[in-house]
Image: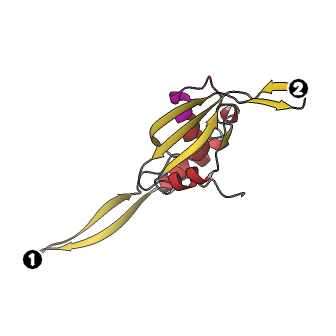
Amino acid sequence: MGILGKILKSKKTDDVKSTSVKVSDDKTEAVVEKKLESKPKKLHKRTDVNAYRKICYPLISEKATQLATLNKYVFVVPVKVNKAEVVKTIKNIYGVNPVKVNSIKSEGKFVRTGRLKGKKSDFKKVIVTLAAGEKIEIYEGV
């Protein structure tokens, strides 16, 4: 077993705490040890190399901030990304478990600058709904 295995194994054994309680009946006293296990931990954030290829950026607009009060967060993703990939990526980046995912495909607008004509790229908006106690810190750097 390597050094990392020993460190990780010792952390797992530290999570279980034991307490001793004296139980007294009429004529007998006994010491009972109870093992208290900690609550199940939340999902851990993991660093995935391709995570930011599947989620471009969070969309910050007036409507998106109103949805954030309802525990719904809006992200912009590439057109080819599906809902299952979005769920995995949200788990990896933010460490929360999405309850529901809605997607909206938007076509890019036609633009013109002087004589030059062009088209903006297509994109997909994804609305991620979280459970009541969970939240995502999107506005940290804003």
**Foreground: disc 2 or disc 1:** 2
The answer to whether residue 8 is left or right of residue 112 is left
Give the percent coordinates (x, y) of residue 103.
52, 33
* Residue type for callout 2: Leu
Q: Nearer the viewer, residue 135 or 45?
A: 135
User: Residue 19 occupies which quadrant of the picture?
Assistant: bottom left
Q: Would you name the residue on which mark 2 appears?
A: 116
Magenta part of the chain: 79-87
Q: Residue at x 46, y 54 (%)?
A: 70
Q: Would you name the residue on which mark 1 appears?
A: 26
Give the percent coordinates (x, y) of residue 29.
19, 73
Give the percent coordinates (x, y) of residue 43.
51, 46
Q: Residue at x 71, y 33 (%)?
A: 49
For the residues labelled 2 and 1, say whether their Cβ atoms are less than 8 Å apart. Answer: no
Q: Residue at x 54, y 52 (%)?
A: 11
Q: Nearer the viewer, residue 78 or 64?
A: 64
Query: What is the secondary structure assignment of the residue under circle 2?
Result: strand
Q: Is residue 20 magenta?
A: no
In the rendered image, the vertical position of residue 46 relative to residue 106, given as above or below? below
